[in-house]
Amino acid sequence: MTASEASSVERFELALWQLQSYFGDPVATIEAALQVDPELVLGHVLRAAALAALAERRFQDEARASVVAAEA
């Protein structure tokens, strides 16, 4: 993982734990990481995965936006 800030990695790891444990709000946590480090590619990937895991069509555009950001 490449990151410009250690705090973004810490938030990423917390968001990953939240997603895996169904505890807290992983989307909000990873968005906080992306605020600190918008170029955290794995953060965009995790955000897309978390939104896709919700399995609701209303989150498709947001998930797609995360994929586009990761590709950029």
Image: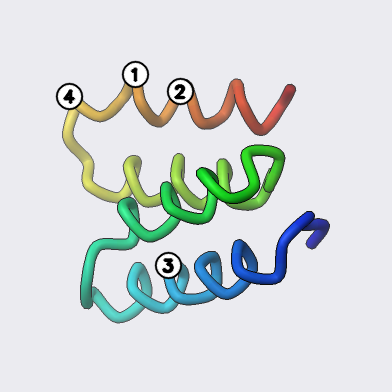
Q: Position of residue 2 (x, y in %)?
A: 82, 57
Report the front residue among 61 and 29.
Answer: 29
Find disc 4 in the rendering and name its residue.
58
Give the class, few, some or many, for how many residues have Cα within 10 Å of label 2's Cα (few <14, many ≥20). Answer: some
Residue 15 — which label? 3
Q: Position of residue 67 (x, y in %)?
A: 57, 29
Mark 3 and mark 4 in contact (Cβ < 8 Å)? no
Mark 2 and mark 3 in contact (Cβ < 8 Å)? no
Find disc 1 in the rendering and name its residue.
61
Q: Earlier in the sequence, mark 4 or mark 2?
A: 4
Find disc 2 in the rendering and name its residue.
64
Please say which color scheme the image uses. Answer: rainbow
Quadrant of the snapshot with the N terminus: bottom right
For badge 3, the amino acid type reads Ala
For badge 2, the amino acid type reads Arg
Circle 1 SS class:
helix
Question: What residue is rendered at 65% in x and 51% in y?
Answer: 42
Cα distance, mark 4 to mark 3?
A: 21 Å
Q: Earlier in the sequence, mark 4 or mark 3?
A: 3
Mark 1 and mark 2 in contact (Cβ < 8 Å)? yes
Question: What residue is rendered at 22% in x and 71% in y?
Answer: 24
Specify whether 23 is left or right of 15. left
Report the front residue among 4 and 51.
Answer: 4
Cα distance, mark 4 to mark 2?
A: 11 Å
For badge 4, the amino acid type reads Arg
Cα distance, mark 3 to mark 1?
A: 20 Å
Q: Is residue 5 above or below residue 60?
A: below
Q: Earlier in the sequence, mark 3 or mark 2?
A: 3
Circle 4 SS class:
helix
The residue mark sitting in front, 4 or 3, is: 3
